[in-house]
Image (cartoon, rainbow, N blue to C red):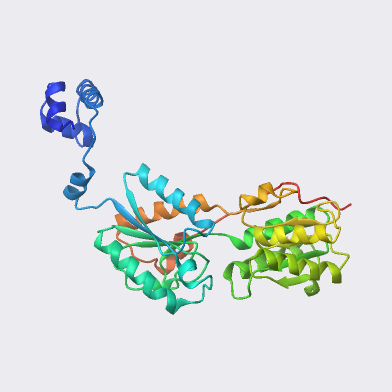
Amino acid sequence: MATIKDIAKKANVSPATVSYVLNNSAQISPETRERVLKAAQELNYQPNNLAKSLRKKKSMTIGVIAEDITVFSAPEIIDGINRYLEEKGYHIILNNLRLVKKVGNNYSKVIEHLEEIKKSIEVLLTRQVEGMIYIGFHMRDVAPFIKGIKIPIVCTYCYSSLGHISVNCDDYQGAYEVTKYLLENGHRKIGLITGPNDSLPSQERLKGFKDALSDFGVKLDNKLIRVGNWEYESGYENTMSILKENREVTAIFAMNDLMACGVMDAAKELGIKVPDQLSVVGFDDREFSYFHDPKLTTVKMPLDKMGEEAAKLILECISGDKLICTEDEKEIRNLKLKCTVIERKSVKKVL
């Protein structure tokens, strides 16, 4: 493996000059710089990042804790984190807690989760990570899990009531926009299948739905609202209930794509054609939503961008040595990224 001394010999300069060029840390003439860089390229020089990090007293490593990478949102968020940090010369150590597999999909199980998360954090701290990014499997308060950590931490797909920096999508805005889309297409009798009542995304999406109806002068009809559990079956069963009791419904908004697929299959079983007789929209933009027949109109969450912004913020925290937000920074430091309506083939205009 080529060394700085090998480059110096080939470029006919001192090792110090090579170091200045490679680290861009001194004024070097363009001719000398070009000669050194050419020699480094020809020798296939690879910098020793470990040695560099030791000199700077930095590990150049960020710990990433994912509550469960099998949850659909996690891979895209991680990819956004990894891409940005890689560009900045950082590496990640990823720890997948597998919480959903170990203790189930109940996001209120704080005590059961606490021990698993504590172990993971301790492992990352022994690896001398400069900061951590915490990725939730559901939007919830993770303050009990990260309380007392003495290095910078950023939350994404979750938040901390202690004021740690967070990056999330705007569930309210996404639901408002997709409801507005249905209203602009003439729909007034719109069924709604929510997530569980204690789910923060479900609460925010319900607010967005209600406000869109209000802004269009459409009265909320509680008979058209059902509470689901994010699963396909609840979309199917609740649609059967809505359509059998309310034949005037022309559209259904399911608060995630899994339930929306259940909506479309229930409609098909009842002999109701989507979108000719019933329009359907979802939320998440899962891959399968594109392959369902008809292709599902849905709301895309900016997951990759959430990861990228979380990575940017953790580096800002490290450089500024901030552990939490101050009160006057919360508006800036707790980001909500906009969602996008993805128009496909499951909505038809009502004349």
Q: Position of residue 42 (x, y in %)?
A: 24, 23
Tell me if 196 is positioned left or right of 253 in this view.
left
Q: Nearer the viewer, residue 195 or 351?
A: 195
Residue 155 visible in the displayed image = yes
Tell me if 87 is positioned left or right of 345 in this view.
left
Q: Position of residue 39 (x, y in %)?
A: 21, 23
Who's the residue at 45% across and 49% down the image?
Answer: 79
Q: Nearer the viewer, residue 88 or 68?
A: 68
Residue 341 visible in the displayed image = no
Who's the residue at 18% across and 34% down the image?
Answer: 20
Which residue is the extreme one toward the bottom?
A: 111
Tell me if 16 is positioned left or right of 251 in this view.
left
168, above or below 11, in the image: below
Q: Quadrant of the N terminus?
A: top left
Q: Quadrant of residue 270?
A: bottom right
Who's the residue at 75% across and 69% down the image?
Answer: 238
Q: Position of residue 273 (x, y in %)?
A: 84, 54
Who's the residue at 38% across and 69% down the image?
Answer: 117
So how many labels did they put on this image?
0
Q: Nearer the viewer, residue 269 or 118?
A: 269
Tell me if 167 is positioned left or right of 218 in this view.
left
Q: Position of residue 306 (x, y in %)?
A: 49, 54
Q: Nearer the viewer, residue 293 or 299?
A: 293
162, above or below 282, in the image: below
304, above or below 16, in the image: below
